[in-house]
Structures are given as structure tokens and as C-alpha cells.
Image (spheres, coloured by chain):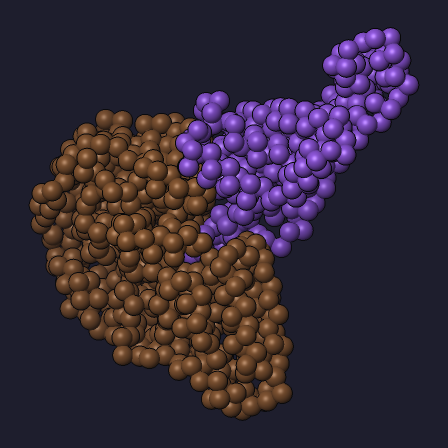
């Protein structure tokens, strides 16, 4: 949180000078690595890609106006050389770097920036990230198809873009660092149409050299990279369709450098018990919270006493033990590494007697039956069973409904699920800002039919406070803004639409030859590793 | 023969049509919304409706079905909802790997199944027979995921005879083929054994022996071709069973086939891919059965195609 505050203070000073790239003095350029993933890479189109495996691949192929310092949540300019925010916070002017080239050799200009933002918000693109740009002037007209392009984005000259907002938005620079805001070359997008995702061309540190569908992707170093000195690696091969257990065997055999899906749960203890292997595991926090949603429109959870009782009934330590301590117990919606986290809030204490009393107060002294929806992949059904036992102790008989992910999401969206354990679908922040945990999952906007606010909790006062907090875009307001967000989440805990259970930790394993700072291997933004800054030592 | 083939092909076309109706219907009643998967978790209801309209998912089910079917008849399987890529391209990129794996698995089934079945029949009642039959029972009941990992661990990791998963060379093909074929091999060895035992009791075998033919010649020339008949009919059905197994085997061995594609599409409700893979599998099963029926009279002239 402290580092974030300093960085925000820097980031928000008007007109940002170019920072000299800090290169790792130990890094040796060259070499090739192999990364594995189980699931296929659906697309490398930055407007579409929203998966675990393609998110950081896209980060290495493309750039946006803003970016993060490697291994941190500190914003830094990307394709923008500097930017200015107007005094009222309603407009940003970005000065682009000169001479940045796309992988096809053409120079990137302000027209490309405008084209890319128009494209991602065009309903025909069907981007899952379009909603992030809602504060840009003209978004509503563009998203409804009434207008072509965002009226708020204007090209001032070939190296200057001005973006007008409808309201001050403290998260705006984070949004400009999302993959969805990456700059794409119009002529290539138009050439390939829907197949641009299989033929990506960007300005990033790597370019796509080969893609054998279903088997592997090869990235080659972009020798013309505008960021001098990076990437260190010449080549990355992503091998697709590999079970995590097999990926681990291959790592142990020296064939794989980083298993992209991490250490399989069944092998976790074995790996950590071996000092040689455990030394190559990097642990870090991630912006994740696993929670139980309680539908506030459905009895018995329409009574706040019952929702609080559920919060008190959970033995979170035992649940964390069940998953080999790969998480820390959660007290509130925000994860500990998120700015705005309330460190001095202890959460609801584990207290079965007090919980029973609350149940009696709510008129459920004789108990009640309900349903707990859960995604059907390990360890989620096991976690649901532990929750079931804890609830049973206070008289809530919960029947477990273990379903495929899409079916749980559907039941949550249409409000037919009284309780959902969020594991496997849980919220991982899109960007390191407290507002990202509110809107779609706790705000009124997500509480409608089909929305991701599965508890259907809608508190209009909190929505007003949230909008007010996000309008505090001035640097001197940053601290007050985080306090405002902290207050909002404390009020959420009072109403208790969720029972936060744990925050998952990340464990990335690497081969002995991999070099670079540990923080690159638990980069909060580039998961599992920051491809641009890691290197090999042999 | 020609008339028979024509009739069978027409029948097959109706079967495939029926499969499109059933699959489409099942996907339609599935309580999961593909548009939610496309639109992402922050989408507003307007955005969701807009995408639904673009994909034609706001139309009545029969209109959607007709659109799909008329596309299919023109060879257009549509585009993946999430990958945006042409489904035919995705399947074409992966189908050769699955077909290769099936050929490998059938070969394994036949080599192991037939050989061990014949040996067991010839050694009936002896310890070798009992041992083989227990072994076949284990092979039939062993979960494929476990077999796959076991083979991988022993023959690839420990002994280093084969690569640890992947695709490309003959060496890559061996372990996945054995994994997929081992269950069928168990079945075949049992079937071959009992079929051989029946045949060996037949009069013509005694006659063949009586006229002085060698034991090996009797077995290879007279007993086996007759005993193998029920098995040929089975191979056509195997293709259907394989389609279930390839999902597991392909994912453990990192084999880039259509099983992996289907599995991931099901998780994300990517309907065009699910429909496409189902159709391709159904065509493979229908053709496999047809082929088995056509081969049967070549082995046994008593069978007539009508």
C-alpha cells in the first residue's frame, strides 16, 4: 500500500518525464525458455483476450499508453512519453513516443490510439473489456451503436491524443494500462478481421513467430523494441495442452522452465518438502478473494442476522489448511495487497455460540435449509463440504449443488442460487485499485439479471459513495480516496452480503536456469511471470 | 452392394440429422448463457443483449437451428464464440492428431488383444490363461487417467524410452496409443479367447487336424479368421468409445487432438465448437460402423449385405 501511494503521488504529478529504464546488471541477453499451459490460447487479440494464459502473452506482444513497473503495481508511462491531466480531472493529454514501430515496420501514431479505443468499445468487436472505458465521453453512444467511435478521444497531432471524460475517474490511468487499451495497427486488423487474434501484430517486446493451433506458440524477441535493452530472452515457446502434473514431471526432467498453471495441488506438499525444489518456488500475494455470496433477496439470507451468523460460523483456518495453506484467511472483500485494504479490521470472529444466538434472533432457532452452489473442480467441492459442516453447526442445512462453471455463473446471475462458493470463478482484480472489487460484484450495476453481483446486494448509498470516491482523481486526494473506499468496504461487511473466506497466494515454480528478481515471478499484473524481464543464466 | 451402400448412406444422413437436432436441443436447454461468457463479468445488460443479437441467439430456437443447419449443409460450421476463429479451421488443425491416435489405439488393441486372446485360448485352464484373464480384467477396469500417468512415469520419466508427452514423432505416439488401446485390448483378449475356444471345438478344425495340417497352420488359416469375426464388428463401435477416452488421454499426453478442443469448449459454452466436434465425431462413428459392416463379408462369405 505504501509503495502504491508513493507511485500514485509520482504518477499524478502533471507532465511525467521519461524514466530511464532500470536494467538488471546481472541479466544476460539471449536464450530461449519453455512455458506450459493446460488450456488452449483462445486468442491473442488484446480487445478479446481475458484468460489466465493469454493475458500476459498479450502484454508482451502489445503496449498501451500506460504500463506497470515490472513486478509491481506502480503505474508508469508506456507508449505515452508523458501525459497531463486537466485541473478539473476531466481530460488527459498523452504525448506519444516518437519512432515506435509495429511488428510490421510501420510507425505507430495517435491515429492508431484512437482507432484502438474506438474498436474496443465498438459493439461489433464484442470485447469483454468494453465496460472499462465507460467514463470516456461518448462511450454510451459508441456502445449502443448510435455513434461510430468515441467522441471523447481526439487526435491533436500525430503524436498527441486527448481523451475527455464524462466525470473525473481516478482509475482512468489503470484502465489505460489494461490489455483492452492496447494499441493495434488498423491495416492488420482490417486485413485479418476476426482472425486478427490468431495473427497479432503489436508494438510489444516480443512478436509472434509461429502458432501451431492446439500445440505451441513461439514468441521471438522484437529487435526493434522501443524499450531499450529488453526483452532479455530471444525466444519463448509456449506448449499448450499439458496437464499440470505432466508439466511438473517435465520441469523436473529439465524440459520446461515455468509451468504456467503452477504446482498441481496433489503434488504441492511433495514439492515443498524437497528443499532443492522448494527453493525454486516463489511465493507472493495476488489480488484475489474467495468468498461466499448470500442472496439478500432469498430467505433466510434476507435477514442480516443470518448473513452475519454465516460469517461467524466459518472456521477459515481449517479451510485454509485443507488447501495446504496456499491462502490466508480473509476478513473483508479486498485482499491485503490491495490499496484501500483496512489493516486494523479483524473481521467477524469465529464464534459458533454467538452465531447461533443471531440465528435465534432471526427466528431460525430450529434451523433452516438452503443450497450452496459450487464449481465442480477440485478443491472446490471439498471446500464446500467444509463450509457445509460449519453451517450445520449453527443450524443451516445446506445442500451442495456442484456444477460446471458456466452453470454456476448462470445460477448466480439469475438469482436462483441462495449461496455460492466463489472458488474457481472468484474475483481476481483486473487492475490494482479498490474500485475494481466493487462495481460489478457488490454494486447495484451488477445486481440485475445476469450480473456478477451474485448476492444481489444493492445499496444505493454505497453506490453514491463509490462514484464520489472514484471522482477524486487529483493527486492530493489519493489518500482520502483510499479512506473512502476502506469505509465503503467496512459498510459492506456490516450488511454482510458476502462471507469472505480466504485470499489465495501464488506459488510459481521455475527451472534452475531461470534468472531475474523473484518479484518478476509473482508479478501482480503479468501472470505467471513477466516475460519481458526474466532471463536465463546458462 | 451398390444399392446396399446407397441405402446405408441415406440412413447415415438421417442419423446425423437426428444428432444435430438432439445436440442443438440439449445445448439450448443447458442452464448456461454463452453470451455471458463472451461479454465478460463487467458487461452491462445492454452490451449482453447487443452481443446476443449479433450472434442471432435472440431468435427462436428453430430459427437458430435452421440457420445452423443451412450453414452446415454448405460446409460452414460457424465461428467460435470466444476464439472468433472458423470452427472448421480449428477442427481441421486438430483432427489429424486424433485420427492418428485412434489408428495407434486400434493397432494396439488388435496386436495385444488378439495375440493374448489366442494364447489364452490355446493354454486354456493353465496358469498362463488365468494370469492373462486377470490381466485383461485389470486392463478393462483401470481408469485411463491413472494408466496414462503410470505409463508416463515409468516409461518416460524413469526409463526415458519415450518423450514425456507431446506430438510429432512415432515415439510420441506409443504411450498415448497404449493408454487408449489398453481397455479395448482387455475386451478383445477376452472375446478372442472365448471365440477361439468355440471355433477350436468346431468340426472343421478337427477335420483340418485329421487331414494332417500343422497346428500353427490350423490356427492361423482356419481358426483365427473365423474367431476374429465378432471382433471386427466391435471396432466400429470402438470409435465411439475412443471419442470419450481421447479427452483424458489427449490432456495427459498433451496430444493436440479434438478431445482437448471439445473439453475446453464445453467449459466455456462455446456452442459452435461443441456442435462441430460432435458432428465430426458422429460422422466418424457412423462411417466406422459402416466400414465394419462392409468388411465383415470379406472375412466371412456367409454374411450377405442386404
Query: Which picture quadrant has residue A196?
Result: top left
Find residue B215 and report its horizontal and vertical position in percent. Answer: 77, 14
The x, y position of residue B44, in whole percent, is 46, 57
Residue B295 visible in the picture: yes
Q: In this picture, is B22 found above or below A274?
A: above
Name the colour assigned to chain A in the rendering.
Answer: brown
Instruction: Specify the quadrant that holds the C terminus of chain A.
Output: top left
Residue A10: x %, y % from top left: 13, 59
Q: Quadrant of residue B210?
A: top right
- The x and y percentages for residue A459 are 44, 75
Question: Observer-nearest residue: B106 or B221?
Answer: B221
Q: Residue at x 81, y 9 (%)?
A: B213
* Residue B174 to residue A447: above or below: above
Q: Residue at left 53%, top 39%? A: B148
Residue nearer the viewer, A55 or A319: A319
Q: Residue at x 51, y 71 (%)?
A: A387
Residue most extreme to the right: B203
Which chain has been coloured purple in this picture? Answer: B
Name the residue at 36% across, 44% down: A259
Amino acid at each position: 500500500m505504501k509503495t502504491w501511494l508513493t507511485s500514485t503521488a509520482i504518477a499524478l504529478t502533471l507532465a511525467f518525464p521519461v524514466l530511464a529504464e532500470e536494467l538488471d546488471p546481472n541479466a544476460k541477453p539471449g536464450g530461449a525458455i519453455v512455458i506450459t499451459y493446460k488450456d488452449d490460447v483462445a486468442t491473442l487479440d488484446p480487445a478479446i483476450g481475458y484468460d489466465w494464459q493469454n493475458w500476459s502473452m498479450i502484454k508482451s506482444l502489445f503496449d498501451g499508453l500506460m504500463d506497470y513497473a515490472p513486478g509491481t503495481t506502480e503505474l508508469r508511462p508506456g507508449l505515452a512519453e508523458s501525459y497531463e491531466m486537466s485541473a478539473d480531472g476531466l481530460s488527459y493529454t498523452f504525448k506519444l513516443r516518437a519512432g515506435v514501430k509495429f511488428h510490421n515496420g510501420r510507425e505507430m501514431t495517435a491515429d492508431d490510439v484512437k482507432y484502438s479505443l474506438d474498436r474496443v468499445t465498438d459493439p461489433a468487436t464484442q470485447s469483454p473489456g468494453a465496460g472499462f472505458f465507460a467514463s470516456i465521453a461518448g462511450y454510451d453512444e459508441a456502445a449502443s451503436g448510435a455513434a461510430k467511435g468515441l467522441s471523447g478521444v481526439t487526435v491533436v497531432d500525430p503524436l498527441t491524443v486527448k481523451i475527455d471524460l464524462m466525470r473525473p475517474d481516478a482509475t482512468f490511468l489503470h484502465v489505460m494500462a489494461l490489455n483492452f487499451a492496447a494499441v493495434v495497427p488498423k491495416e492488420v486488423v482490417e486485413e485479418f478481421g476476426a482472425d486478427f487474434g490468431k495473427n497479432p501484430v503489436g508494438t510489444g517486446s516480443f512478436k509472434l513467430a509461429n502458432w501451431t493451433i492446439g500445440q505451441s506458440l513461439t514468441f521471438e524477441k522484437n529487435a526493434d523494441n522501443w524499450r531499450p535493452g529488453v526483452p532479455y530472452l530471444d525466444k519463448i515457446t509456449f506448449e499448450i495442452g499439458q496437464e499440470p502434473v505432466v508439466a511438473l514431471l517435465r520441469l523436473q526432467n529439465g524440459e520446461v522452465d515455468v509451468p504456467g498453471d503452477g504446482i498441481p495441488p496433489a503434488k504441492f506438499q511433495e514439492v515443498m518438502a524437497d528443499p532443492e525444489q522448494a527453493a525454486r518456488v516463489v511465493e507472493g500475494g495476488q489480488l484475489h478473494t474467495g468468498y461466499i455470496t448470500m442472496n439478500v433477496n432469498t430467505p433466510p439470507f434476507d435477514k442480516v442476522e443470518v448473513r452475519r451468523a454465516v460469517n461467524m460460523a466459518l472456521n477459515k483456518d481449517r479451510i485454509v489448511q485443507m488447501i495446504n495453506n496456499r491462502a490466508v484467511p480473509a476478513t473483508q472483500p479486498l485482499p491485503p495487497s490491495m490499496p484501500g485494504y483496512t489493516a486494523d479490521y479483524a473481521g467477524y470472529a469465529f464464534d459458533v455460540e454467538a452465531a447461533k444466538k443471531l440465528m435465534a434472533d432471526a427466528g431460525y432457532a430450529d434451523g433452516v435449509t438452503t443450497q450452496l452452489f459450487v464449481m465442480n473442480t477440485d478443491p472446490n467441492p471439498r471446500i464446500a463440504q467444509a463450509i457445509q459442516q460449519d453451517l450445520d453447526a449453527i443450524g443451516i442445512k445446506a445442500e451442495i449443488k456442484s456444477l460446471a462453471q458456466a452453470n454456476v455463473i448462470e445460477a448466480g446471475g439469475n438469482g436462483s442460487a441462495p449461496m455460492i462458493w466463489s472458488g474457481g470463478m472468484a474475483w481476481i482484480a483486473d487492475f490494482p485499485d479498490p474500485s475494481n472489487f466493487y462495481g460489478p460484484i457488490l454494486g447495484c450495476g451488477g445486481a440485475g439479471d445476469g450480473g456478477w453481483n451474485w448476492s444481489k446486494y444493492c445499496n444505493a448509498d454505497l453506490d453514491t459513495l463509490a462514484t464520489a470516491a472514484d471522482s477524486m482523481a487529483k493527486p492530493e486526494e489519493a489518500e482520502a480516496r483510499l479512506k473512502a473506499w476502506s469505509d465503503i468496504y467496512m459498510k459492506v461487511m456490516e450488511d454482510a452480503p458476502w462471507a469472505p473466506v480466504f485470499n489465495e497466494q501464488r506459488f510459481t515454480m521455475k527451472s534452475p536456469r531461470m534468472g531475474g528478481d523473484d518479484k518478476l515471478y509473482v508479478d501482480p499484473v503479468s501472470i505467471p511471470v513477466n516475460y519481458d524481464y526474466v532471463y536465463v543464466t546458462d | 452392394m451398390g444399392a446396399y451402400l446407397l441405402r446405408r448412406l441415406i440412413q447415415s444422413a438421417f442419423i446425423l440429422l437426428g444428432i444435430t437436432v438432439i445436440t442443438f436441443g440439449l445445448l439450448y436447454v443447458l442452464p448456461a448463457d454463452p453470451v455471458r461468457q463472451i461479454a465478460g463479468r463487467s458487461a452491462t445488460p445492454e452490451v449482453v443483449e447487443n452481443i446476443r443479437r449479433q450472434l442471432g441467439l435472440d431468435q427462436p430456437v428453430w430459427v437458430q437451428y435452421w440457420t445452423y443447419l443451412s450453414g452446415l449443409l454448405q460446409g460452414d460450421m460457424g465461428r467460435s464464440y470466444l476464439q472468433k476463429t472458423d470452427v472448421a479451421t480449428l477442427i481441421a488443425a486438430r483432427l489429424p492428431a486424433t485420427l492418428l491416435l485412434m489408428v495407434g489405439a486400434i493397432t494396439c488393441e488388435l496386436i495385444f488383444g488378439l495375440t493374448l486372446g489366442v494364447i489364452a485360448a490355446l493354454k486354456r485352464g493353465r496358469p498362463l490363461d488365468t494370469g492373462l484373464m486377470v490381466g485383461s480384467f485389470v486392463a478393462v477396469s483401470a481408469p485411463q487417467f491413472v494408466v496414462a500417468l503410470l505409463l508416463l512415469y515409468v516409461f518416460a520419466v524413469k526409463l526415458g524410452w519415450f518423450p514425456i508427452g507431446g506430438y510429432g514423432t512415432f515415439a510420441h505416439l506409443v504411450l498415448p496409443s497404449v493408454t487408449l488401446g489398453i481397455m479395448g485390448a482387455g475386451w478383445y483378449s477376452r472375446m478372442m479367447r472365448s471365440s477361439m475356444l468355440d471355433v477350436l471345438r468346431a468340426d472343421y478344425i478337427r477335420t483340418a487336424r485329421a487331414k494332417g495340417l500343422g497346428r500353427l497352420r490350423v490356427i492361423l488359416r482356419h481358426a483365427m479368421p473365423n474367431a476374429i469375426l465378432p471382433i471386427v464388428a466391435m471396432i466400429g463401435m470402438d470409435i465411439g468409445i475412443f471419442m470419450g477416452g481421447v479427452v483424458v488421454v489427449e490432456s495427459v499426453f498433451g496430444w493436440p487432438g479434438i478431445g482437448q478442443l471439445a473439453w475446453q469448449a464445453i467449459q466455456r459454452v462455446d456452442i459452435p465448437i461443441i456442435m462441430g466436434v460432435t458432428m465430426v465425431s458422429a460422422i466418424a462413428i457412423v462411417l466406422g460402423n459402416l466400414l465394419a459392416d462392409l468388411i465383415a463379408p470379406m472375412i466371412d462369405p456367409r454374411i450377405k449385405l442386404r
